[in-house]
Image: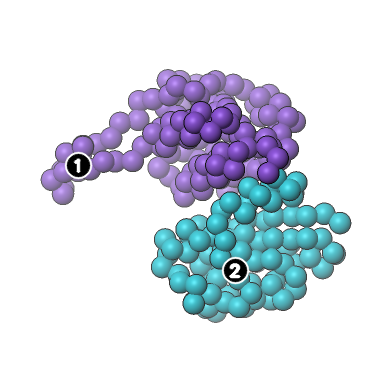
Chain colours: A cyan, B purple
């Protein structure tokens, strides 16, 4: 099976396309692929427990590795203790490592 | 880690979007990890290396240009070139010539070069991976 990194830069309150990207990650994982969803810029906003963060928790339970960019979190004042379960903090270096690993990459 | 080649495609004009900063952070991360990077800058991103970007003062807050220390994308890119040289990596920054001409931003900082959409294809073909930071 294939490996993917989907990079989400938008907040679901900002763009109605974001849930479609989440569903893409979920469906790829359901098909047995290795999937990372890397949240960056305003994409980290739903990582803070809120009315829109359940979607990320479901992705994590469904086998998607959900990572939130440390700098983006810090810019927005989101501490590690405020993150929804299943979301881990990571640096942007992860994106490079996964590109080096040959993952198919999509930026949204 | 084995050295890889990446192509990064940028579209956003300077000062307009956080994607520019994220794109440059990715270039920085790749160089720090010892990889070579080709950046294909088109549409508004063709102006990121425009040599005539100039800082300004802030009259409202009473700061002169030096005090205001206005950040300029051309300086960020110049710093990436310096980092690549220091680390022995290659940073190839290609501005799409069509986009450069449309915008009149043909004066580049040292290191950036003019190219064409064909260079994007060539770079992607020669790379281990390619990432496009779309503007929409």
Q: Is residue A66 above or below residue B91?
A: below
Q: Position of residue A84 (x, y in %)?
A: 57, 77
The answer to which of B84 and B134 lies nearer the viewer is B84
Going by the image, does B126 lie left or right of A2?
left
Q: Are marks 1 and 2 in contact (CB under 8 Å)?
A: no
Going by the image, does B47 lie left or right of B121?
left
Question: Residue at horizontal 58%, vertical 31%?
Answer: B89
> Secondary structure beneath disc 1?
helix
Residue B67 numbered mark, or none: 1
Question: Residue at horizontal 16%, vertical 39%?
Answer: B64
Discs 1 and 2 share one subunit: no
| Res A78 quadrant in image | bottom left
Question: On the rendered image, what quadrant is the N terminus of chain A found in?
Answer: bottom right
The residue carrying mark 2 is A88
Q: Is residue B98 visible?
A: no
Residue A39 numbered mark, or none: none
Q: Position of residue B75 (x, y in %)?
A: 39, 34
Q: Is residue B38 above or below residue A48?
A: above
> Secondary structure beneath disc 2?
strand
Q: Position of residue B127 (x, y in %)?
A: 71, 34
Question: Residue at horizontal 63%, vertical 42%?
Answer: B132
Q: Is residue A83 above or below residue B60?
A: below
Q: How many numbered markers are drawn?
A: 2
The answer to which of A101 and A43 lies nearer the viewer is A101
Q: Position of residue B57 (x, y in %)?
A: 20, 39
């Amino acid at each position: 099976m294939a490996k993917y990194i989907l990079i989400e830069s938008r907040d679901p309150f900002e763009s109605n396309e974001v849930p479609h990207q989440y569903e893409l990650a979920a469906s790829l994982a359901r098909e047995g692929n290795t999937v990372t969803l890397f949240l960056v810029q305003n994409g980290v906003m739903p990582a803070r427990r809120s009315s829109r963060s359940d979607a990320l928790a479901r992705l994590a339970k469904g086998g998607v590795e959900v990572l939130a960019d440390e700098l983006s979190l810090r810019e927005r004042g989101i501490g590690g203790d405020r993150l929804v379960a299943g979301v881990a903090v990571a640096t942007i270096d992860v994106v490079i490592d996964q590109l080096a690993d040959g993952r198919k990459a999509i930026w949204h | 880690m084995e050295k890889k080649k990446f192509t990064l495609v940028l579209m956003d004009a300077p000062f307009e979007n956080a994607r520019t900063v994220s794109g440059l952070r990715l270039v920085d991360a790749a160089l720090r990890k010892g990889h070579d990077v080709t950046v294909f800058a088109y549409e508004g991103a063709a102006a990121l290396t425009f040599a005539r970007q100039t800082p300004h003062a802030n009259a409202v807050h009473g700061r002169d240009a030096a005090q205001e220390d206005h950040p300029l994308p051309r300086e960020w890119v110049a710093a990436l070139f310096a980092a690549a040289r220091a680390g022995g990596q290659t940073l190839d920054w290609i501005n799409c010539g069509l986009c450069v001409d449309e915008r009149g931003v043909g004066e580049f900082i040292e290191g950036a070069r003019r190219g064409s959409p064909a260079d994007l294809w060539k770079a992607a073909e020669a790379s281990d991976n390619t990432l496009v930071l779309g503007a929409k």
